[in-house]
Amino acid sequence: MNIVVCVKQVPDTATERKLRSDDKTLDRDAADGVINELCEYAVEEALLLKEAHGGEVTVLTMGPDKASDTIRKALAMGADKAVHLVDDALHGSDALGTSHAMAQALKKIGFDLVILGSESTDARTGVLAAMLAERLGVPQLTFAKKVEVDGSSIAVQRVTDYGYDKVEATLPAVVSVVEKINEPRYPSFKGIMAAKKKPVEKLGVADAGIDASQVGLANSWSEVVDFAAAPPRAAGTIVKDEGDGGVKAAEFLASKKFV
Amino acid sequence: MSEVLVLVEHVEGQIKKVTLELLTLARKLGAPSAVWTGPGYSAEAKAKLAEHGAEKIYVADSADITDYVVAPKVDLLAQLVSSASPAAVLVAATAEAKEIAGRLAVRTDSGVLTDVVGIEEGLVADQSIFGGGVNVRARVTKGLPIIAVRPNASPVEAAAGAGAEEQVSVAVSEASKAARVVERVKEEKGARPELTEAAIVVSGGRGVGSAENFSLIEKLADSLGAAVGASRAATDAGWYPHQFQVGQTGKTVSPQLYIAAGISGAIQHRAGMQTAKTIVAVNKDPEAPIFELADFGVVGDLNQVVPQLTEEIAKRK
Ligand SMILES: Cc1cc2nc3c(=O)[nH]c(=O)nc-3n(C[C@H](O)[C@H](O)[C@H](O)COP(=O)(O)OP(=O)(O)OC[C@H]3O[C@@H](n4cnc5c(N)ncnc54)[C@H](O)[C@@H]3O)c2cc1C
């Protein structure tokens, strides 16, 4: 099975994240770049499927040069090779532009299964997998907490507000995974060393067959008008429990008309 | 006045509150047209939509629409976009509706904005990003604005609309039938309001100590008619199901009141709850960062404080 796993580098959620004042895009230099956590679950799921069914795992990422750290991480976990979409013309692409670029790259690479994390911690739109399914014309199996492949059939458990849906389709397909689907492995020392020798192909806009009029900030379908840090919350009242903490909390709730 | 399409969210015919919020918002932008998908449409549903301003109600209530993942709803909306030429499409910012919005944007070559908390004149959308840390104003510049609005972000106001019903038959393409829903599994935890829609949320974290002890959190929630939430430490430990996780990789909630018990207030947890109007925290560590957000905090053992609070609320009823 030919599996392509899409990964993204994001600013560490533990640091303060910012927008750039010049072009109002994500400030990637203000915070450390780390692999988007949900992408680790996607890589792990790809590796588990490869171990069970054979095949090859290709990592696909779109991002600036420094995103190569994220590629190395996925390769160190055990993926076989990688494709890095990197081109200044891609900077500032919105979800539509990104999905166009990724879909073109996926067509070029070829796949039986595409796996993504269900959302990234920076943009949090949660739409990329669905957009890829739309653009590639393949089944959308998103928000999966369980994935089973049997020959050319695939079944997933799709998380819903009330529990989950059992969904079935035929490969090729796009899958996105949620946290807790598996326990991502830590790269071993051997894995880290091996990753250094694994092939990473760099593709620019023209190489990947991307339509330059569909990507980049200037071609985005939306624009940021302005932005500001959210005002801080006013300091509250903190009391120490002296046997009456619950009563005091109830009094506070009553003063706010919640009880 | 142009139509504004509002995708109705319902559970087996019961309309969710967020739909009424969207209809209220849509009235400022044009003539609201509710779009009903899947089985469950009734006279009662029709009345409710009309009472909240729906001028038109497009009804596509065949099971075909909901038997497959997302794509048939995109077929339907794309068809209505071309027949009605609306000024905008509004959906709830739920996981599935955002996917519908995303695919519709691709299909109609339009822009999509997610996690919107308000819409101003000229279809400028207010977004809350980076876990509530930054407020952004954004607008769609190409094609039709497709906007996903967070539940609980805007008020519900009734205002009668004509509620003219129009049955729509949609030709669900073979490609849209590629991912078939073969079974729906319900794993509900009692009859509580849904987490993202609830006016009050009571959440427990590692400090709760065990799955059994979550009953303390549930009892407090029930005394307030609240939903129950949990931190990732609690869902990782298996004390509470994952769908109740609040935070960076869980649900984003903005209730009127959020009560956090035994939760430290890590940045990734705050990302899911810091837009709550009022925050109350119970934690035995006076240094816990959750107290920086709290409007009211009790430093103490939740095993004492939470049951006493529950009892006191019962007394005051
Ligand atoms: C990429 C990423 C995504 C994440 N996403 C999420 C997310 O979506 N949601 C989320 O919640 N976390 C998330 N986390 C994890 C987050 O960093 C914290 O680890 C987590 O929120 C901690 O949960 P907690 O507050 O319950 O536990 P802890 O941090 O261990 O805090 C427990 C608190 O309970 C208090 N306590 C203990 N016993 C008692 C008692 N008897 N009475 C009163 N207080 C008591 C302690 O003083 C302490 O403050 C994420 C982390 C990463 C890296």
Image (cartoon, coloured by chain):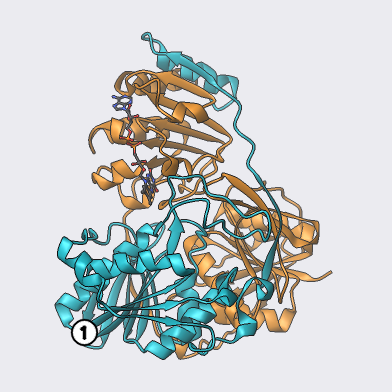
Chain colours: A cyan, B orange
Chain under numbered label 1: A
- Toward the top, the furthest residue is A242
Q: Residues within 10 Å of mark 1 (few under 14, many from 20)?
A: some
Q: Quadrant of residue B82?
A: bottom right
Q: Along the line of sight, which residue is nearer the eye, B186 or B92? A: B92
User: Could you tell me residue A146's position as x and y percent?
Assistant: 26, 67
In the rendered image, which residue does mark 1 sit on? A55
Q: Is residue A146 visible?
A: no
| Residue A103, horizontal then vertical, whole percent | 47, 83
Ligand 1 position by quadrant: top left
Indicate the quadrant where residue B265 lies.
top left
Q: Nearer the viewer, residue B126 or A210?
A: A210
B153 over B287 or under it: above or below: below
Query: Helix or strand or loop: what does disc 1 sit on?
Result: loop
Position of B131 relative to A131 (above/below): above
Relative depth, front residue between A231 and B171: A231
At a point 33% along the width and 36% down the height, the residue shown is B205
Q: Residue at x 78, y 65 (%)?
A: B31
| Quarter the N terminus of chain A occupies | bottom left
Q: Can residue B262 be seen at all in this image of the molecule?
A: yes
Query: Total number of numbered labels?
Result: 1
Q: Judge left or right: residue A37 versus residue B85.
A: left
What amino acid is found at the position of numbered circle 1 in the picture? Gly
- Determine whether, in the image, residue B270 is placed left or right of residue A91: left
Residue B3 x %, y %: 76, 70
Measuring from the top left, give residue B15's x and y in whole percent: 55, 58
